[in-house]
Image (cartoon, rainbow, N blue to C red):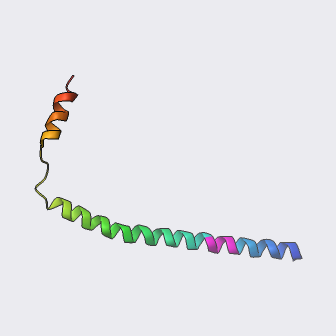
Amino acid sequence: MGKSEKKTLERREFLKAAGLTGAAAGVAAVTLSGNQADAAVTKASSSAGYEETEHVKTYYDLARF
């Protein structure tokens, strides 16, 4: 194995490790944010639900064709 082949292999190994580290960080971020999203959905589902407020009624009136 020549000197240039060794450098190429070292570079490839570095890039593989960097890619795996980035992927692991992405998975961790999604996992952590998923827990927060679940809490938000639980909180939202326990509310009274859809309310037809004045601004919603105004939108419905203006959106009619």
Number of numbered discs on residues: 0
Extreme residue in the top direction: 65
| Residue 31 found in image quarter | bottom left
Instruction: Tell me which residue sits at (16%, 29%) in the image.
Output: 61
Instruction: Check the image and report above or below for 48 versus 35.
Output: above
What segment carries the magenta color? 14-18
Instruction: Tell me which residue sits at (31%, 68%) in the image.
Output: 36
Residue 17 within the segment the image draws in magenta: yes
| Residue 10 found in image quarter | bottom right
Q: Position of residue 20 (x, y in %)?
A: 58, 72
Question: Could you tell whether 31 is left or right of 38 in the image?
Answer: right
Between 21 and 57, the one nearer to me in the picture = 57
Question: Could you tell whether 38 is left or right of 23 in the image?
Answer: left
Instruction: Check the image and report above or below for 65 versus 55.
Output: above
In the rendered image, which quarter contains the N terminus?
bottom right
Q: Position of residue 21 (x, y in %)?
A: 57, 74
In the rendered image, which quarter contains the C terminus?
top left
Between 52 and 11, the one nearer to me in the picture = 52
Instruction: Tell me which residue sits at (65%, 71%) in the image.
Output: 16
Q: Position of residue 41 (x, y in %)?
A: 24, 61
Residue 58 within the segment the image draws in magenta: no
Instruction: Check the image and report above or below for 37 versus 56.
Output: below
Between 5 and 47, the one nearer to me in the picture = 47
Q: Main structural element of the magenta stretch: helix, strand or loop?
A: helix
Instruction: Tell me which residue sits at (67%, 70%) in the image.
Output: 15
Extreme residue in the right direction: 2
| Residue 28 found in image quarter | bottom left
